[in-house]
Image (cartoon, rainbow, N blue to C red):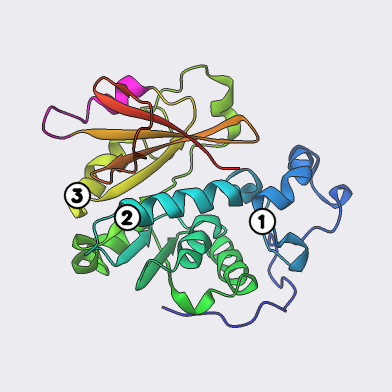
Amino acid sequence: MARISSATDAPDQDGIHHYDESSEMPAEIQKYWHQRYDIFSKYDEGIWMTDDTWFGVTPEPVASVIASHIAEGSPADKTVLIDAFAGAGGNTIAFALSGRWQRIFAIEKDPKVLACAKHNAAVYGVSNKIWWIQGDCFDVLKKRLKAVAKEAVIFASPPWGGPGYRDDEVFDLSLMQPYSLSDLYVPFAAFTPTFVLFLPRSSDLNQIAKYTSKDHPLEVTHYCMHGASKRWSKEDEIQLAEPGARSEHRRVSLRTRQGW
């Protein structure tokens, strides 16, 4: 589990970029250029991303709020956090900056994306707080982190199959690619009772509700930024409700949070 200590090197792998202006970007992702400081406030300090991670990274204000909520809502005896889909490091960095966790493990399957995450953590000065692992998160949890996972909080912001989910008024989580809701919930629940899934904003809540019961409540948090909807975060056994906050109690508990 290697760590990175330098944030000054230029990208030396094909597919890893730091764009200085939108005209350098492929046309299909140029629309994300104006969001660069929302994605990483330190973008100009040399942030690295692959083209796919531009629409996959959690915006920094939202990532910070999520990190705060999980830090506050997790059981006090939970001191290890596992980021199962680290991506370019947005959530992982926020968890490290929170100062809540004694150990943070960040798992990423794509070696180029992992290189971005390591570098970006160094830009934010938290590279020495994160243990990086390349591989499939389910294999890693089963083989390398099985004992750790039992006592950890797992956070999972999985790929959703690209930005196409935005076209659906209600997104069918059984069709999410490459992992459906069932593909995520069942194995994570087997590792630990304390985990969080970060899902598309239009996710079908009825599908989520199937995993709850009278004795096993779930909370769904709706995150917004600049007044616009972002994503759903489904917490299992981590209750992040603020005192007096309004919610709708059906089979799941719903809350709206402002990221910024």
Percent across and percent down for residue 203 are 43, 26
Percent across and percent down for residue 89 are 54, 60
Residue shown at 25% from the left, 63% from the top: 78
Q: Which residues are magenta?
A: 205-216
| Up-down relation of residue 200 to residue 204 (above or below) | below
Q: Amino acid at mark 3?
A: Pro
In the foreground, 146 or 238: 238
Disc 3, SS: loop
| Mark 1 lies on residue | 40
Task: Rate crowding at label 2 as few (under 14), some (14 to 19) or many (20 or more) other CA atoms within 10 Å.
Answer: many
| Up-down relation of residue 256 to residue 108 (above or below) | above
| Mark 2 lies on residue | 154
Query: From mark 3 to mark 1, how far is it between C-alphas?
Result: 31 Å
**Mark before the other along the chain sequence, 1 or 2:** 1
Q: Quadrant of the C terminus?
A: top right
Disc 2, SS: strand
Query: From mark 1 to mark 2, how far is it between C-alphas?
Result: 23 Å
Q: Amino acid at mark 1?
A: Phe
Query: From mark 3 to mark 2, how far is it between C-alphas?
Result: 9 Å
**Mark before the other along the chain sequence, 3 or 2:** 2
Disc 1, SS: loop
Q: Check the image and name the residue furthest to the bottom.
A: 5
Q: Amino acid at mark 2?
A: Ile
Q: Are marks 3 and 2 in contact (CB under 8 Å)?
A: no
| Up-down relation of residue 192 to residue 208 (above or below) | below
Percent across and percent down for residue 174 are 36, 27
| Mark 3 lies on residue | 193
